[in-house]
Structure formats: C-alpha cells, structure tokens
Image (spheres, rainbow, N blue to C red):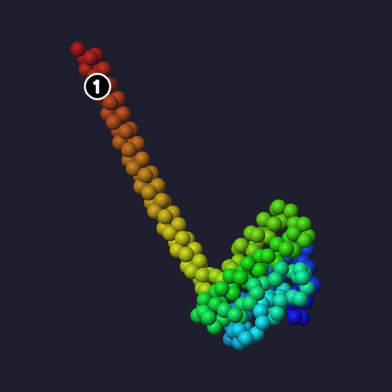
Amino acid sequence: MEGAAAGAQYNPRTVEEVFKDFKGRRSGLIKALTTDVEVFHWQCDPEKENLCLYGFPNEQWEVSLPAEEVPPELPEPALGINFARDGMQEKDWLSLVAVHSDAWLLSVAFYFGARFTFDKADRKRLFDMINDVPTIYEVVTGGEKKQVKEKSSVTNHSSNKSKSNSKVRESQGKFSEAFTAKDEKRSWMRKIRRAWGDIMWCMR
C-alpha cells in the first residue's frame, strides 16, 4: 500500500492545510465512485480479503488492504467494502461506500486537528469549511443537484416574497396617504364649520 503510506507521511498543520488535504482526498474518492467506477467495481473483488478505499491528498485513490501497523498512523477507512459488492444493487453499494468515505474524511481531518492541537475556533473554522462543500454521498446520489434546485427555489420564493412585501408596503403607503388626506379634509371641514358658526353667532 505505497500510496497509503505516502498519504500517512503527509502532515498538514494549519486549518488551511488540513482543508486542502481533505479536498484532495475527497476528490480522489469521488473520482473512484463516479468517473472511475468501472475500475473501482472491478478492483473490489469479493473473493479477495478485506479491502479498503483510500483517497490521497494528490486526488488519487486506491483499493487496498488495511495498514499492517496497529494502531495505524491515520484513521482507517471502512473495512471489507468488497464483500457487499455482489449482494446489493450497484447504486446502493456505491452509496454505502460513499457514506463510509465521508465518515473517514472527517475522522482524518479532525485527527490532524487533534494531533496539532487546534483550539475551539480552529476546529469550528475547519468544520465550517468542510461543511460548505457537498458530501461524497450527495455527489454520488445526486443530492448535490437537488440542493442546488432547492436553494434556487428558496431564492425565487424569497424574491417573490420580497416583491410581494414591497407591493404590500406600497399599498399600505398609498392607503396611509389616502387616509391622511381624508383625515386632513375632515379636519379642514371641522375648522370651516367652527369658523362659519362663529360668523353666524357674530351676526346675531
């Protein structure tokens, strides 16, 4: 497992470096489960021993046996992904691998955070940066596109609501102006009546 060993020797120390490491590994895993899916499927032979899917910072991936050292230098991905390959529909199997890959990426990222003593603010910033990108599961299952559509729908709804509120405010403004004008007219009529009453009283 030369690739995995090379990945283990890479030690990002800042939030930005850990996030870059995360993105590289994520890209490699997405490649395995999408564009390289036929090769990935072929390599996950159920007749072989427990296999794992590794993603590396250089955006490459590898199906291999787990690390021999115990405990391993880095958290290990899900073990035995090949055994379930022929017992499930392919899309369900890929979704399952994607979920485990998401969990593995988080464990690796926060392993580095713990190892290099990220404080509360750093951990939150790292989480926020990770949370801003779609999960592998969302990419593999098409959930990413659904979220974009939902966001677009929410944006349009908000825009329409804003326009509606603007019209309501405009109508309220016109009504208020009309009411004020009407009120002023009544006040003016009362003044005229009082003045006319005073004139009539003086003429007596």
Residue 178 location, quadrant: top left
Q: Is residue 20 visible?
A: no
Q: Please report the residue visible at 55 percent of the width from the left and 74 percent of the height from the top.
A: 95
For the C terminus, the image quarter is: top left
In-image side of 59 versus 142 (left or right): right
In-image side of 189 versus 174 (left or right): left
x and y percentages locating residue 45 in the rendered image: 62, 85
Q: Please report the residue visible at 41 percent of the width from the left and 58 percent of the height from the top.
A: 160
Q: Nearer the viewer, residue 166 or 145?
A: 145
In-image side of 23 versus 145 (left or right): right
Disc 1 secondary structure class:
helix
x and y percentages locating residue 192 in the rendered image: 27, 25
* Furthest residue in direction top, as rendered: 204
Q: Read off the residue under disc 1.
A: 196
- Residue 78 in the image: above or below residue 131: below
At label 1, which amino acid type do we have? Trp
Q: Nearer the viewer, residue 35 or 153?
A: 35
